[in-house]
Amino acid sequence: LTPVPAFSKKAAAVPRGGEDFGPATAEVAPSVFNLVNNVAGAGLLTLAAGMAKGTGWVPSILTCMCLGAASGHTFNLIGESCRLTNEGSFKGVWTKTLGDNTYVIDLIVAMMCTGASIIYSGILGDVSKELLSAVGIETDRSKNILMITVGVLFPLSLIKNLSALAFTSILGFASIVYTVLFIIFRSMDGTYGPLGKFIVDDVIKKPDFSKSSLLNFDFTTLVLMSNLGLAYIAHYNAPTYYRELRDKTQFKKMVAISFSILTVLYAAVMAAGYGTFGDICEGNILLNYHPSDFLSTLGRVATGISILFGFPLAFCGITSGM
């Protein structure tokens, strides 16, 4: 048997195998910002709707924590596979372990990332149309998507090294944090309560908590699990994060920090969103807020920014399989 190389700094040199990658220069902190921005995306906004299907408070929080831990563990396993095979891509790992039919894994990753990219483009089209309409500019959603794709997304997607996106990922991370804090604030300030100023004019649906429970756990929980499963996914980029990290011994630490942050953010926004609107939570929680709620408008802007800067991270999964 061939001995397994120790996980040391010497063994943590940039894995190359048969592929030519650039130098590994990423540090832990920028990688954390990249990964959180890569994972969170639009999935953050769907969690309250998953809980609203009928799952109780305790099972919802526990499900969020368990899937966060499982997702972080599987992300780590991909990095460990790269270490054991001394490879820096799914293609390389697949070749070392299963043979030369790498088209299978390339196709799977490309399909997943293409779907994510299409969803991101659609959300950006919706957000831009809504924001421009708010200031009196009527636009076409399709034209907005085309202009954003050509003018912003395509240039950003040409960047092959994720560490080069560290600054934009910090902006995306800040946008995600704002959205979470805004949702938490609105859940506590009473403006969406029974006599709240955004409820009494009957412009939006009134919150309903008829399904709310402490411990309910049934088949409706599968909806929440599905939403969380998608919300935690960025595993298609795990080999990229591993090979670009300067000190490979810090990979597990980077992943642990990232998924801990994500779990806290997800649990907070899920609980606060459901605590505000209850059973009427939309698939995009921002759609529940009053049109004249300025903080929610800023939340839409923040969502647009986080998705805009998260798009290249998702698109990277497509290019890595080419």
Image (cartoon, helix red, strand yellow):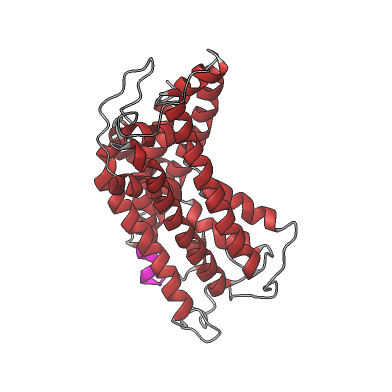
Q: Position of residue 272 (x, y in %)?
A: 51, 70
Where is the C terminus found, in terms of image quarters?
A: top left
Residue in view at x 24 percent, y 35 percent: 25
Please check the rendered image and state whether residue 292 is part of the magenta-colored stretch, yes or no.
Answer: yes
User: As drawn, is 174 to the left or to the right of 38?
Assistant: left
Front residue (pair 222, 130): 222
Work out which residue is located at the far bottom of the displayed protein and give it: 195
Q: Nearer the viewer, residue 306 or 35?
A: 35
Asked whether the viewer can see residue 239, the reply is: yes
Q: Say which residue appears at 46% left-offset and 79% top-offset.
A: 188
Query: Does residue 197 appear left or right of residue 21 in this picture?
Result: right
Q: Is residue 279 visible?
A: no
Q: Name the residue at 63% across, 56% down.
A: 224
8 with respect to 287 (left or right): left
Q: How many marks?
A: 0
Where residue 241 sits, quadrant-wise, is top left
Q: Residue at x 46, y 34 (%)?
A: 80
Q: Whole-percent x and y of residue 128? A: 37, 51
- Residue 111 image offset from top left, x and y in percent: 53, 30
User: Is residue 250 or residue 110 the one in the foreground?
Assistant: 250
Residue 139 in the image: above or below residue 245: below
Q: Is residue 245 magenta?
A: no
Rendering quarter of residue 142: top left
The magenta stretch spans which residues? Answer: 291-298
Q: Residue furthest top?
A: 100
Point out residue 173 in the picture as x, y percentages from the top left corner. 34, 54
Q: Main secondary structure of the magenta part?
A: helix
For residue 213, above or below residue 33: below
Q: Residue furthest right?
A: 218
